[in-house]
Image (spheres, coloured by chain):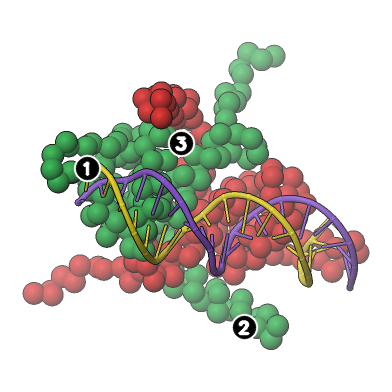
Chain colours: A red, B green, C purple, D yellow
Amino acid sequence: MDGIPEQELPYDVFAKACPSRGTLEHVTGRWGALTLGALHEGSLRFNALRRRVDGVSEKMLSQTLHALERDGLVHREAQPTNPPRVDYELTPFGHEVAERLLGLIHLVEGRMDDVLAARTRYDETRGGR
Amino acid sequence: MDGIPEQELPYDVFAKACPSRGTLEHVTGRWGALTLGALHEGSLRFNALRRRVDGVSEKMLSQTLHALERDGLVHREAQPTNPPRVDYELTPFGHEVAERLLGLIHLVEGRMDDVLAARTRYDETRGGR
DNA sequence: CAGCATCCAGCTTGATACTG
DNA sequence: CAGTATCAAGCTGGATGCTG
């Protein structure tokens, strides 16, 4: 009967305690997703990244990069020069993740007119209250 | 020279003020992603959904569903019976989004061993402090 | 069952200031 | 340039109680 063990995955985001949930949050979080998206086009230095991800604070970017580096999605390349120069780039796994993320992002961007229309409809329907 | 206008998208998540950023957050948010993932397999009633998305509170699920419904990703089907029965299901657009999301989720789940190993390495490297 | 209203602890976030 | 440290404020989210 368990001749064909049904290839059960050891990790399941739907389970509260699964560590994959944490990683998913790093990846999809407000700044995580945009950071990965930005780095998918090529490596960037700290402040360039900060400019690209419009609205992120120094602190949040730093924090986001640490989490992504820790999870093995981003590689940090520091050159001991003066002034310091640090480049951030995606690891192969980071690129895989970023690709899917960008697919999602573009899908959403491309349908924003529909989304906005849906919102208007929704708000009008229950607009009175 | 703008014979071939380069198909510029009107929406850009990287821009702070773009409404697409809000929608992306609804979609990728902690509960948004899991809710869409759960509903991709089929419609579910409120409490079934609550059980499926392990750890979500009533309030957060309700809030998440409202946001997704407003953005046109989820359809709410209420039957005026007693006791009340409400089914939630994805719209076609919701399914498209959920598909990509699940791709991302499975990618992450499938690589968790690598992620965990990367974390250990990271923590050991700067483990001292 | 399917939810809304309220309260409030605490985590997240953004400013600001400082270091190497 | 590339960050870290600190602090206040605001939003997130859970618990509880109630409605239809």
Chain ID, mark 3: A
- Distance CA(mark 2)–CA(mark 3): 39 Å
Residue A55 visible to an observer of this rendering: yes
- Left-right relation of D17 to B125: left
Q: Are marks 2 and 3 in contact (CB under 8 Å)?
A: no
Identify the residue position indicated by label 3 in the image: A107
The chain to which mark 2 is attached is B
- Tell me the residue at 44%/25% (across/down): A120
The one of D15 and B7 positioned closer to us in this rendering:
D15
The image quadrant of residue A68 is: bottom right
Residue behind mark 2: B124
**In the image, what residue type sits under mark 3?**
Leu
- Label 1 or label 3, whichever lies nearer to me, is 1
Q: Residue at x 29, y 36 (%)?
A: B75
| Residue depth check, mark 2 versus mark 1: number of the one nearer the observer | 1
Quarter assignment of residue B67:
top left
Three-letter amino acid code at disc 2?
Glu
Instruction: Compute the Cα span from label 2 to label 1.
Output: 50 Å
